[in-house]
Amino acid sequence: MQELIQQLQAKAGLTPEQAAQSIEVIKEYVKGKLPPFIAGTVDTWFANMSDKPGEKKEGFMDKANDFLDDVKDKAEDWKDKAEDWAEDAKDKISDLFSKDKKQV
């Protein structure tokens, strides 16, 4: 995250405090635009941006790509669940109408 703060200072002329606050605003904005089941990924992604000694530092774009991969995976999981729910609903409706026809 320090890398991003430094870039905001250099490119936008922000103080370290302003840069850190800007990142928080961006994080909250992104979380607000995503479905709740993905919003937690934003917190994780930003938390993993902090510089940790001894670890290979990824660039901002690498981290962004990792984040987007996570979002894609979660979206695919939810797509699968939605398809399952739709299939279950269809089966229940079909069963309901089948029972009605038998009773008539």
Image (cartoon, grey):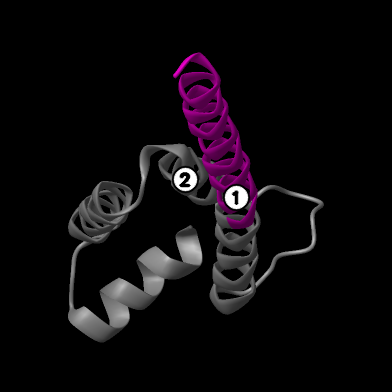
Q: Where residue 104 sits in the image (x, y, percent)?
A: 44, 19
Residue 50 or 32: which is nearer the viewer? 32
**Residue type of the residue flagged with mark 2:** Ile
| Residue reaching furthest to the front | 104
Whether residues under marks 2 and 1 lie with C-beta atoms below 8 angstroms apart, the answer is: yes
Residue highlighted by disc 1:
74
Q: Residue at x 37, y 77 (%)?
A: 7
Q: Which residues are magenta?
A: 76-104
Q: Earlier in the sequence, mark 2 or mark 1?
A: 2
Q: Where residue 91 sits in the image (x, y, percent)?
A: 59, 34
Q: Secondary structure under badge 1?
A: helix
Residue 85 or 26: which is nearer the viewer? 85
Q: Residue at x 29, y 53 (%)?
A: 20
Q: How many neighbours does mark 1 have within 10 angstroms: few (below 14), some (14-19), or many (20 or more)?
A: some
In space, the residues marked 2 and 1 are separated at their CA atoms by 7 Å
Q: Mark on residue 38? A: 2
**Residue type of the residue flagged with mark 1:** Lys
Q: Residue at x 55, y 57 (%)?
A: 71
Eyeballing the image, is 24 above or below 69?
above
- Location of residue 36 (image quadrant): top left
Eyeballing the image, is 102 above or below 8?
above
Q: Secondary structure under badge 2?
A: helix
Q: Does 97 appear in magenta?
A: yes
For the stretch drawn in magenta, what is the main secondary structure?
A: helix
Q: Where residue 82 sits in the image (x, y, percent)?
A: 53, 44
Q: Does 85 appear in magenta?
A: yes
